[in-house]
Amino acid sequence: MGEISEFSFTVRLFVKTYKWRRIDPVPWTPPTMPLSESRVAVVSSAGFVLPDQEPFDKKMKGGDPSYRLIPGDTDVSTLIDAHRSDSFDHTGMDQDPNLVFPLDRMRELVGSGRIGELAPRHPSMMGSITAPGRMIKQTAPEAASNLVEDQVDVALLVPV
Amino acid sequence: MCNQTVGLIAAELERQGIPTVAIQLLRVVAEKVGPPRSLCVPFKHGYPLGEPGNPEMQHKVIEAALSMLEQPDLKPPAIIDYQL
């Protein structure tokens, strides 16, 4: 488990006193087909962008709720770390983007037949959103409808 | 915050009909936010799939997450702790 104790005092205090948004009611969609036939998308909050995409806004109050769509055939070594938070260690993800955006691992799972196929687009967000109102109302529904358009069957979400 | 962000997106995906599983780095946040399916992993922030350059370990974590989609007895919000 990630431990609260790995953070600075200020961040620990924040985690304790922040009003976390409870999902209520919890929506529940059971899968309707085996994973071996499913189209799978990755959603990562690691703040990666492609060289031709606008970086996330590191200064926006409450956090930048926008997202970028990363094509499924992206070479992960071209992803750029645009995450603003210094409350976690970026070394690992900068060394191996699959640690937080596992497109190569998903391709291997397609190769082995564990999953059916990789989705054509994968949402990338910058997770340090302390005021998630706009994300809940606007950008999360938009990103989700992109995946619905792409007929995605299952999504794996990866935070940092 | 990243844990809450992916949890809230997971909820929206499920509302729109897409089953999800979310990796979570802090159990306390997974419990408070309550994404539909959470795999809580024992790694530090920045390392959700374990180790950089270790595809085998990354696959184990991904497999544990995906297998939650194959457990019809789970009830929302479902939380499973990843065992090293």
Image: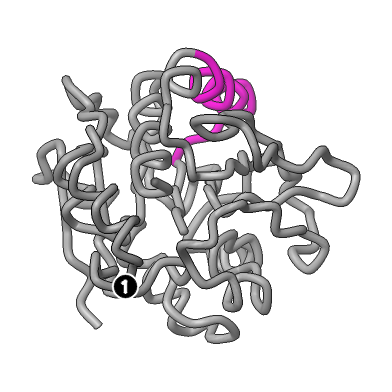
Please say if A113 is above or below B18.
below
Q: Quick one: label 1, few (<14), some, or many (20+) residues within 10 Å?
A: few
Instruction: Tell me the magenta residue range.
Output: A138-154
* Residue at (22, 33) in percent of width and height: A19
Residue B19 sits in which quadrant? top left
* Residue at (48, 84) in percent of width and height: B56
Q: Where is residue A66 in the image (x, y as percent from the top left)?
A: 63, 29
Please say if B21 is above or below B84.
above
Query: Does B32 sit left or right of A92 as displayed?
Result: left
- Which part of the image, by quadrant, shows the N terminus of chain A? bottom left
Label 1: element kind: helix
* Residue at (17, 22) in percent of width and height: A24
Q: Where is residue A150 in the image (x, y as percent from the top left)?
A: 63, 28
Query: Does A57 sit left or right of A6 as displayed?
Result: right
What is the chain letter for disc 1?
Answer: A
* Residue at (78, 53) in percent of width and height: A73
Residue in front for this viewpoint, A69 or A116: A69
Q: Is residue B42 magenta?
A: no
Q: Where is residue B38 in the image (x, y as percent from the top left)?
A: 25, 50
Q: In the image, what residue type sits under mark 1?
A: Glu
Q: Find the residue positioned furthest to the right.
A: A52
Query: Does B29 sit left or right of B13 as displayed?
Result: left
Q: Is residue A147 magenta?
A: yes
Q: Mark 1 points at which residue?
A: A6
Which SS does the magenta portion mostly show? helix
Q: Position of residue B22 (x, y in %)?
A: 35, 49
Query: Does A1 sit left or right of A97 as displayed?
Result: left
Residue in front for this viewpoint, A133 or B75: A133
